[in-house]
Image: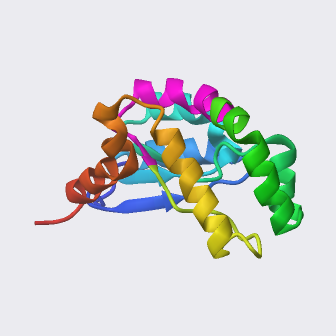
Amino acid sequence: MVSDHGNMLVYFHPGVGHQDNLERALQQYSDVTFIIHADFVRPHVQGIVDRNPNVYYTYNDIFGISGEVAETFRFGEKEAFLADMRAEWDNLLDEADEMYRPMIETHLDRFMRGTDRGDIVWGYDEEVGQILAEFGRAFIGRFDPAIQADLGYKNAERLVTLTTKP
């Protein structure tokens, strides 16, 4: 089934176990451009993006935060989270790089930085926001300078331009 929605952007934030339903929607509406986000589907993103040229993926400032630091971010105190981030900075960047670099380098034009940080009560705190933004910039800084702007904002600009009616 092909729809008449070729200029539509759909932001899709799938939950745990939703990758099959997501992929069905992507294929059923192959003329719709989907932007997907969520670590819940991250293990499936490479295959989803490979099979569906209408899919783009956003990673955000918390994408590489894992393990105990992730638990502190979700359930701990703000000061503990900030201290953990500083203490684990390089390890977290290394983990994020290992998880995302292969996908990004395979589809350089379909990955972009996003801003979805979740609904943690202090997740929008200015100090927390600053360290998360710094982490996101540090991650992008690990890539070839020739593509850093693409990952930071140009891929998103191109996507909006492609789907905007003249």
Q: Give the residue at x 43% y 31%.
A: 143
Question: Which residues lie in the magenta part?
Answer: 95-112
Task: Examine the structure image and report whether residue 111 is included in the region drawn in magenta.
Answer: yes
Quarter of the image where one finds residue 5 = bottom left
- Please tell me which residue lies in front, 127 or 153: 127
Count of all numbered marks drawn on residues in the image:
0
Q: Position of residue 36 (x, y in %)?
A: 52, 51
Q: Give the residue at x 62% y 47%.
A: 21
Left/right of residue 87 with respect to residue 103 in the rendered view:
right
Q: Give the residue at x 84% y 41%.
A: 67
The majority secondary structure of the magenta stretch comes to helix
Q: Give the residue at x 49% y 56%.
A: 114
- Please tell me which residue lies in front, 21 or 156: 156
Task: Examine the structure image and report whether residue 87 is included in the region drawn in magenta.
Answer: no
Q: Position of residue 40 (x, y in %)?
A: 70, 46
Quarter of the image where one finds residue 51 = top left
Please say if 8 is above or below 154. below
Please say if 28 is above or below 10. above
Left/right of residue 131 with respect to residue 80 in the rendered view:
left
Q: Position of residue 160 (x, y in %)?
A: 28, 59
- Please tell me which residue lies in front, 49 or 4: 49
Quarter of the image where one finds residue 77 = bottom right
Looking at the image, can residue 93 be seen?
A: yes
Q: Position of residue 158 (x, y in %)?
A: 24, 51
Looking at the image, can residue 59 be seen?
A: no
Q: Quadrant of the C terminus?
A: bottom left
- Please tell me which residue lies in front, 108 or 165: 108
Q: How is the image coloured?
A: rainbow
